[in-house]
Amino acid sequence: MLAVSLGPRLHRALLDLADATGCTPEDIVVDAVRARLGAEEGRVREVAEGLAGAHTELLRRLGE
């Protein structure tokens, strides 16, 4: 479980969005967290692949 303090304006906006979309505030927050994690995962993967490509020879030698 995680508790997050949103502040009154952000909390009100979340409640308004939940009401307008027929979702629960929790569903909206979970969807937002999943989207952020997915975006960051892709960004981290790109950086890791770039580093691996730039250092292919070194990684090969370390694996020997």
Image: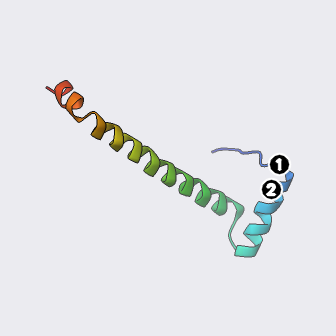
Q: Residue drawn 49% across and 54% down?
A: 38
Q: Amino acid at mark 1?
A: Gly
Measured from the top left, where is residue 8 in percent x and y? Answer: 86, 52
Pointer 1 local density, CA inside 10 Å: few below 14, some 14–19, many at least 20: few
- Element type at marker 2? helix
* Residue 52 vertical position relative to residue 35 in the rendered view, above or below: above
Determine whether label 1 and label 2 are within 8 Å by CB: yes
The Cα atoms of the two marked residues, 1 and 2, are separated by 6 Å
User: From the viewer's perspective, is 29 left or right of 51?
Assistant: right
Q: How is the image coloured?
A: rainbow
Q: Residue drawn 37% across and 40% down?
A: 48
Q: Residue drawn 65% across and 44% down?
A: 2
Residue pointed to by mark 1: 7
Residue 11 is marked as 2
- Element type at marker 1? loop
User: From the viewer's perspective, is 8 left or right of 27?
Assistant: right
Q: Decide which of 40, 7 is in the foreground and name it.
A: 40
